[in-house]
Amino acid sequence: MSPVIEVHGIIHDFGALRAVDGVSFEVAAGEVVGLLGPNGAGKTTTLRVLAGLLTPSAGRAVLNGVDVHRQPLEARRRLGFLTASTGLYERLTGREVLTTFGRLQGLDEATLARRVAEVTRELELEDFLDRRCGQLSQGQRQRISIGRAVVHDPPAYVLDEPTASLDPLASRDILELVQRARARGKAVLFSTHRMEEAEHLCTRLLFVRGGRIVARGTAEALRAESGQATLTGAFLHFASGAAEARP
Amino acid sequence: MSVLFVLLEKELLDVVRDRRTVVLTLVLPVLLYPGILTLMGAIIAAGKDRLKHEPLVVAVTTADAQRFLDARAPPPHTTWRRVARPEAEALLRDKKVAAIVDAKEGAAADVDGGRQATVTVLYTKRFDRSMEALERVRPVLEAAGARALRLRLEARALDPAFATPVKLEAVDLDFQKELGPLIASRLLPVVLLMMLFIGALYPAVDLTAGEKERGTLETLLVCPVRPVQVMAAKYLTVALVSVVSTLVNLGAMAGTFGAGLSLAGEGASTSLRFTAGQVAVMLACLVPAALLVSGVALAVSSMARTFKEGQSLMTPVMLAGLAPALVSQMPGIELTTVTALVPLLNVALLVKAAVLGTATAATTALTVGSVLVSAALALKWAASAFDSEVFRFGGTPGWAKVWAGRKRG
C-alpha cells in the first residue's frame, strides 16, 4: 500500500540546537503509527514540520504525494492536524468553527453542509454545536477541535497528544474516533505519553530521543527488543538511551 | 467565498463578540464626552454658583480702609468686620474671615489731599472662598479709586480721558463670543489620537498574541492559507475597529460640543458645530492614521507570545503615539510644510488646524500623503512579522530580522 504520510531525513535546527536529526518514516492508509518519546525529544517539532508550520533545515515531508514545503497549500488540504495545545475560538459557536474551517479548506457550500452534518453525527456534537466554545467542557471542546481538524475529510491525520488534557471518558471517545478513522482508511500519526493508548491503538510505534528515531516496530517487537515485559518498560529503556537506533 | 473574506468574517465575528473591545471602542466614547464634559461644566458652574452665594466675612483693619469700602454698598452676601491687623491674619488662617482689607491711618486723607494711598487686600489662593472675597472686594475698591479720580479731574476741570491717554482694548476676533473652537482645538487632537490607539491596540494584541496564547493561531496556519492572508484579515479587522472607534469618538465629541456646554460665569458659550469641510479634513487624516497605527500595533504585538506580554509591548507604543498629540499643544507648534511630514504630529496639528479653520489644502495633502506612506511601511513591517516563524511560535530573533523578512517558513 502506498504511504500517505512520508518523512524523509528531516532535520530542523533552532539556532544552534538540533531539535530533529534525520527522522524518516512512513504511514500508510489504514495505519495508526505512534510517535513516542520523552519531553523535548523532537516529536512536536517533527509534527510541525510535517504540517508545514516549520521549514526543515534539510529533508522533505510528503502528504498523499504532495511535497509539504513546495506545495504547502495543496499539502494542507490533505492534512487534519490537532495538537494538545490547540485552542478554539471561544467567542464562536462550534458550528461557526466548523463552517469557517471548512470554507478555509476550500469546501463548497453543499459539501460543507454535508460534512458538518457527518462530523456532528460522528462526534456527537448535536447538544452543544450552537453554543459558544468558551461555554463548553474540556471534552466537548476537544471534540469540536477534532471536528475542526477533519471537517474537510483529509486522508492524513496528525494528532499530537490529543488526550493529554482529557479525563478517561473523553479520552475513550477520542480513541474510538481514531479507530474509526483507521477503519475508513485514514493514515494516522499519533503522538502520546500514554503507553496503554499507544499499545491499544497503534499498528506500529516510533521511539524518539534526542531528535532521532531510536527504535521502531510493533509494540510486541519493541518489548522483545528491549527485553521488557511492558511497553512502559520499553519506553524507559529506549528513552534512557540504553539502546542505539536500529538502522 | 475567498479565503480572505472567510478569515475577515471570522476575525470580525470574534472581535465584535468581545465585550472589552466593544466597550473600549463604542460604549466608552459615547458615554465619555457627553458624560465627562457635561459633568465638568456642571461641576464648574455649580462651584461658581455656590461661591457666588456663599456668605463671606471680610476683615477691615482701620477706619480709613472702611471709608474706601463705604464708597459703594457691600457686595451681596458680604459683611465687613472691623478687626485689628494681627488678629485679622489669624482669623484668615483659621478661615474665619475670607480676606483682609488694610490701609494705614491717614490713607483717606492722603487721597483727599491729592496724594496716593495704598490699600492692601490680604487673601490666600489656598481657599476658594478667599479668592472669591478678592473678586468681591476688588470692584468696590476700584469704584473708590474711580470716584476719587473723578473728583480730582472735576476740581481741575479736566476731561476723564486726561487720566487715561492710552486706552487698551484687546479684541479676540475669533473667540470673543465662542470658546468652543478653542477648547476643541486643545482637546480633540489628544483625545482622538488616544482613542485611535486604544481602538487599535487592544484588538491587535488580542488577534495576535492572544491567539498564540489560546492556541488558535496554529489552527489557522495549518489550513491552506498563506500567512499574508491571515495578516491581511487581522490588519483589516484592527484598522476597521480603529476607524470605527475614531468615527464614534469624533461623532460623540461633535455631538457634545454641538449641543453646547454651559460654563456659568465665563461670559461666553462653548458651543461648536463642525462644518462638512472640517469633518472631511479630519477624516482625511484620521483614517490613514488608523491604518498606520493598526500596522504598527500588529507588527509589535505579533512579537509577543502572550496577551500580557503584548500589553506590555503596547505601553511604550501608546506613550510614543501620544507624545505628538501633546507636542501639538506646545506654544508655537503649528502645521507647516515641515511639521506636516512628521507622522502623527501632523495628524494632531491638522485636527487642531481644522477645528480652528486654519488648515490649508497644501498642508492637508502633505499630511495625508505622509501618513499614507508611513502606513504602507507599517504594513510591510507587519507582513514581515507575520511571515516569520517567530510570529507563529514566539521567540526573540531581533526585530531587524523580522523587518528584513528573514527566517521565513
Image: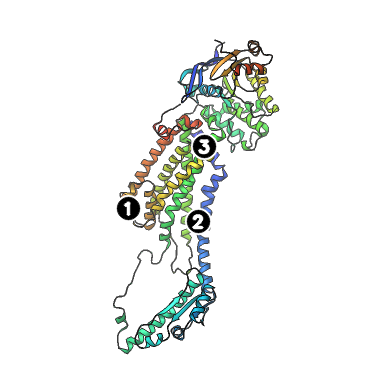
Q: Secondary structure at mark 2?
A: helix
Amino acid at circle 3? Ala
Q: Are marks 3 and 2 in contact (CB under 8 Å)?
A: no
Q: Secondary structure at mark 3?
A: helix
Horizontal side, residue B69 vs residue B333: left or right: right
Amino acid at circle 2? Tyr
Horizontal side, residue A142 vs residue B202: left or right: right
Q: Nearer the viewer, residue B310 or A41?
A: A41
Image coordinates of residue A4 in percent, x first then y, are: 55, 16
Q: Can residue A17 be seen from the camera position used here? A: yes
Kindly report the distance in space between the C-alpha atoms of the residues bearing marks 1 and 3.
Answer: 41 Å
Mark 1 vs mark 3: in front: 3
Crowd class of label 1 (few under 14; some 14 to 19; many from 20; radius 10 Å): some
Identify the residue position indicated by label 3 in the image.
B209
Identify the residue position indicated by label 1 in the image.
B360
Mark 3 vs mark 2: in front: 3
Mark 1 vs mark 2: in front: 2
Identify the residue position indicated by label 2 in the image.
B33
Q: Can residue A186 be seen from the camera position used here? A: no
Q: Nearer the viewer, residue A146 or A21?
A: A21
Q: Are marks 1 and 2 in contact (CB under 8 Å)?
A: no
Image coordinates of residue B267 in percent, x first then y, are: 44, 69
Q: Chain of mark 2?
A: B
